[in-house]
Amino acid sequence: MQTAVLVVAAATAAARIDGAAVSFGGPMRHMDRVAMGALRPGGAHHGLRIGAGTVSDGDRHSDKLVELAAGRRAPNATERRPVPLKCGESIQVHSKSDKWAKCPRECPLLAEHVSNGIHCDFRCVEATVDGCKSMNKKETIPDLENGVCRGCVLEGCKVCASDGTDTCQACSSGYNLVDGKCHNRFFYAWVAAFVLLGCIAGVVVAWFVDLFRRPVVNQAALSHALRQR
């Protein structure tokens, strides 16, 4: 009994901050779990005082924890700012590269330089066809939405046009070039084949349904046959 009283007293004391009881229905809903971890005795940030807004342990993240606990600051998943890139600067991409890095407004597109023989070498270029073409003659379309220079996105296209539009110059085998687009020359043949297969499948299904719906006309012979199985 005495042990239970001590446990309850300790829990009550831990739930008080500067003499004010904290309830889960009140200001606790504005606290981050990180700040709650700081309130536990023996925690990594033990000693946090919400009322005074200080951390006695001198943790380097004390200001952020106090703001989170007080509800004055929302947690942000991307605290750091991306490293700014420079126009024309050679950027060799690898596993440790900053994926949030962006090109400046003067040269907002990232293009791969393929003529220098360096693997994964990118540079920031102007949002023009000539700017993209200077890096890669196969990727001449300035895509401002994705921030890159890209090639045409067309089904069956083998050689894209170099005018900065989604236009094809030569199609792959099995495609016909019509007004800059590639059309499958066997499209109607495939449609006819699928229609034929669908008809065959429909006939088979209808036949099985008819067999299951037929009435039993010789129950004695059916029962004898089932017994001989």
Image (spheres, grey):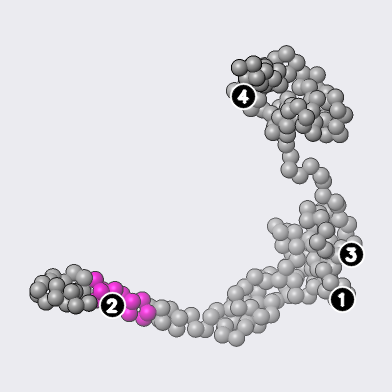
Q: Mark 3 Cα within 10 Å, few/some/many (few <14, many 20+)?
A: some
Location of the N terminus (image quadrant): top right
Q: Indicate which disc residue 90 carries.
A: 3
Inter-mark Cα distance, 1 to 2: 61 Å
Residue 203 vs residue 58, the one in the foreground: 58
Per the image, label 3 sits on a secondary structure element best described as loop
The amino acid type, in three-letter code, at marker 3 is: Ser
Label 4 or label 1, whichever lies nearer to me, is 4
**Residue type at tag 4:** Phe
Residue found 85% across the figure and 24% down from its top: 56
Q: Residue at x 59, y 82 (%)?
A: 177
* Residue count near mark 2 (Cα–Cα under 10 Å), binned few <14, some 14–19, many ≥20: few
Give the Cα separation between the discs numbered 4 and 1.
62 Å
Decide if residue 8 is in sight here.
no
Please report whichever mark, 3 or 2, sits nearer to the chain's N-terminal start: 3
Task: Residue 193 in the image: state x and y as whole percent.
Answer: 41, 82
Residue 88 lies, in percent from the top left, at 89, 63
Q: Looking at the rendering, which quadrant does residue 37 occupy?
A: top right
Disc with the residue nearer the chain's start (1 vs 3)? 3
Q: Mark 2 or mark 4: which comes first in sequence? A: 4
Residue 113, horizontal then vertical, whole percent: 84, 70
Label 1, label 3: how many angstroms apart (C-alpha)?
13 Å
Determine whether the residue tagged by mark 2 lies in a helix, strand or loop: helix
- Residue type (three-letter) at the residue carrying disc 1: Gly
- Point out which mark residue 56 bears: none
Query: At numbered mark 4, what does the secondary structure look like: helix, strand or loop?
Result: loop
Please state which of the two labelled residues, at mark 4 or mark 3, is closer to the viewer.
4
Residue of label 1: 117
